[in-house]
Image (cartoon, grey):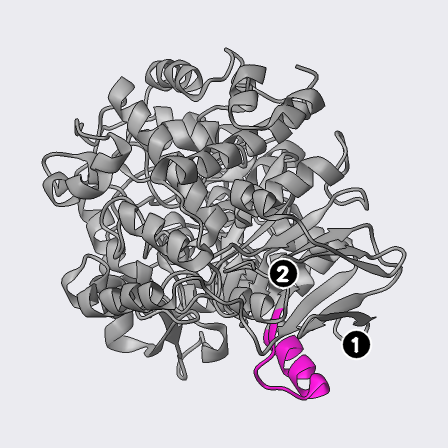
Amino acid sequence: MAYGYNGKILHVDLAGGKLEVEEPDEVFYRKYTGGSAMGAYYLLKHTPSGADPLGPKNTLSLMAGVVTGAPVSGQARVTATAKSPVTGLVGDSQSGGFWPSELKAAGFDGIVIHGKADSPLYLWLHDGEAELRDATHLWGQFTADVEDVLREKLGDKRIHVLQCGPAAEKGVRFGALISNANRANGRTGMGTVMASKNLKAVAVRGSERPEVADPKTVRALAKWGADNLDDSDVEGLGLLGTAEVLRSQNKEGGLPTRNWSSGTFEGAEEISGHRMSDTILKERDTCFACVVRCKRVVEVTEGPFLVDPRYGGPEYETLSTMGSYCGVSDLAAVSLANQLCNMYGMDTISCGATIAWAMDCFEQGLLTTEDTDGMELHFGNAEALVQMVERIGEWEGFGRVLGEGSARAAEALGVGKDLVVAVKKHEYPAHMPQVKRSLALIYAVNAFGADHQSHEHDPSYDEDEDYEYYVDRLAPLDLLDPQPKAILNAEKVRYSLYTQQLYGLLDSVHLCQFVWGPAWQLYGTNQIVDLVQAVTGWEVSLWELMKVGERRLNLLRAFNAREGVGEEADTIPAKLLIPLQGGKSDGVAVTAEEVEAAKAIYYRMAGWDDNGRPTRAKLEELALGWVADELGL
């Protein structure tokens, strides 16, 4: 008997209207575990080289993990995988909430979506059954309204919906997948891929979650987390959400400001988690079975920027990209920008970063009001920020240009290419390599572009901070020689690679990186092993699980290699080479030489060739010989 998973992957042929269930064996589940690794497997198997990201040959998968739905904190996660319309390379994006656990309860571990429907459809999964239904009436509607309509039509208020929004339908490249009207698979344009297939939504409802092998141990782990939350570093996430870190980032000179010209924002306090909690916070929300409750719900009922609590509240990334990136310190305006992104279904990071790029161009005279539909796109203009988010969502005027993302907008307009802060056309998130040096490397080499949740950040391996507190969690990874935050040497590269592999595991078995991890998280490295054993009944070791993370890393990289892309795409933006202005990080810059040296070390440690591509030996070592064959190695 299988524990922790259903043993069913649903394949959806939209063109033919066919639904087929694949039942992989236990070896397959143990090898890939779900989530990102499994999504990458299906992408390589079913999406041919050179496929158009917005064409019918691109395959979109939605994968839970083997521990998703277990009654313990931090397991309600899902990965969306497809070829990205943002980067033209592999796309990979995670989210939480209640949809992932409900997918498992509905009888499926994942969905692989093929082809394109002739007209809008939605997929309805319930207690092991699957149906494709007409979605013409849902096309163009805002995300919360779609949820309301489907719950009423299907007669169950507990249905959960994952959907693309109207922005993706119109063509915005960084369209997100939205569930609960406020949880987003935001990055790499997975919502745009779903919209390109004429698939509006996937609604799920189920009554039976997969059994766990050792319920007593799972209950003990759940109780341990609840009992230790108040004494952990995660307590602040529950009190203030991810916005907790905004103050400290600003203090350290690591809060991207005015399109990365500075790491210090004079208006940081106005958009901080503390200010949010004191003023507009309505309630704290959570994901399935999680005691942390890090999700914010805000409401603004007065003033020019009214905010509806149905759409949640801004996370740290959004407070930064819509706030400090754009020089905007109006918390209500930033919260409304967040709401608009959730309504229209857009990635707040790419959206805010692209607007910040346009503001930088406007400030430098590279763009004028003739380009921007008459808007004064100055840093700090809160009204213009909100208006531009809406224009992007509506795919109108200058919003059509910015809806392509900053890199493509710069190419189309022929201005500001050196002001774009992105790699592989994927905008940087709000953590600065200038003050956390390993990010310069990981942003560059990450297969789907800059991502802040692909490895453990530098402060966790800095002896001047809390390394001694984390040592028992990093020691199982053989990480015993802490380094300063601003150093990018061989040991820091090793730390980056090993924790990247661990994060790859988390994104595959599907555990939240705010709750499970190798340092400050509520649960530590060895407890990850305990949970997987208790849920699945497998006698796994940390070694075996780390191989899942390494396998995932190589699958993602192999997809790009098959597209003919390697080391030349692993770059850093020109902005990082310019010294920052003001605050604690004044005068700090990244050098191209240190990143290139780190890349060379990283490739060798990863078992890749000098062009950053997986070798046959490495792929065979990971039981991925079929991938080596696919690459012609």
User: Residue 243 in the image: x percent, y percent?
Assistant: 30, 60
Looking at the rendered structure, the secondary structure element under dot 1 is: loop
Depth check, front residue: 326 or 170: 170
Q: Which residue is mark 1?
A: 137
Q: Amino acid at mark 2?
A: Gly
Local packing at callout 2 (Cα closer than 10 Å; few below 14, some 14-19, many 20+) is many
Q: CA distance from mark 1 to mark 2?
A: 19 Å
| Relative side of 269 to 87, left or right | left
| Residue 486 seen | yes
Depth check, front residue: 162 or 311: 162
User: Residue 215 in the image: x percent, y percent?
Assistant: 38, 68
Asked where in the image residue 204 lies, by quadrant, the reply is bottom right
Of the numbered discs in the image, which one, if any, rests on residue 263? none
Query: Start and end of the magenta stretch?
Result: 144-161
User: Residue 143 in the image: x percent, y percent?
Assistant: 62, 71
Q: Is residue 443 above or below residue 57?
A: above
Depth check, front residue: 214 or 404: 214
Task: Please tell me which residue is depicted at 49% across the width and 73% down the height of the picture.
Answer: 311
Quadrant position of the N terminus in the picture: bottom right
| Relative side of 561 to 382, left or right | right
Quadrant position of the C terminus in the picture: top right
Q: Which residue is mark 2?
A: 393
Q: Are marks 1 and 2 in contact (CB under 8 Å)?
A: no
Q: Is residue 439 magenta?
A: no
